[in-house]
Image (cartoon, grey):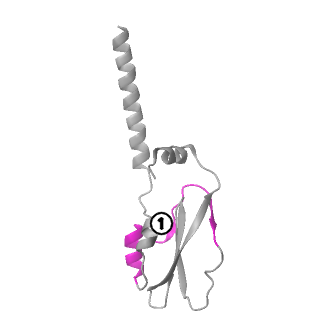
Amino acid sequence: MKKRRLLWFVATSVLLFGAGYAALWLTAPRHRINALSFEQIREWMTEKEVEGILGVPAGDYTTAPVMVLDDGTASTIWISRVKRWTSNDTAIDVFFDDLGLVTRKRLLDVIPLEESIWQKLRRWLRIN
């Protein structure tokens, strides 16, 4: 009888852990806003090509409050527009000219202001 209870406990624990892991994995962000994608962005690319690399249009894809460490170098006169992609880990600024082509890019550090228990679990389990 003790073996049956132990087996039931182990099987239930494994099932619950698997279901929890699957839930975290399924709710993880689907963007590719990271340093590896940043390296793939090249001058003269279009905004659509940049979106293809990063997986999403420009915007804020954070799941908690963050602070972007911006040094203020985005304010150059010859740049017509800047688009920013922000995640919990990093922010990417891409500078476009009047024709909509990439002229410059920069990678910015992001500091989380608070982290939920789900974000901690994702970080610990490396599900980001």
**Residue at 41% in and 86% down:** 44
Q: Secondary structure at mark 1?
A: helix
Indicate the amino acid at tag 1: Ala
Residue drawn 48% across and 72% down? 58
- Is 90 in front, or is 86? 90
Residue 109 x/y as whole percent: 59, 65
Magenta residue span: 45-70
Please give the residue where the numbered disc 1 appears in the rendered image. Answer: 35
Magenta segment includes 54: yes
**Residue 39 locus on image (x, y percent):** 44, 72
Characterize the local packing of mark 1: few (<14), some (14-19) or many (20 or more) Cα atoms within 10 angstroms: some
Please say if 50 is above or below 23.
Answer: below
Q: Horizontal placement of 43 versus 95: left or right?
A: left
In the rendered image, the vertical position of residue 55 relative to residue 113, given as above or below: below
- In the shown orientation, is residue 16 left or right of residue 84? left
Q: Is residue 92 magenta?
A: no
Q: Quadrant of the N terminus?
A: top left
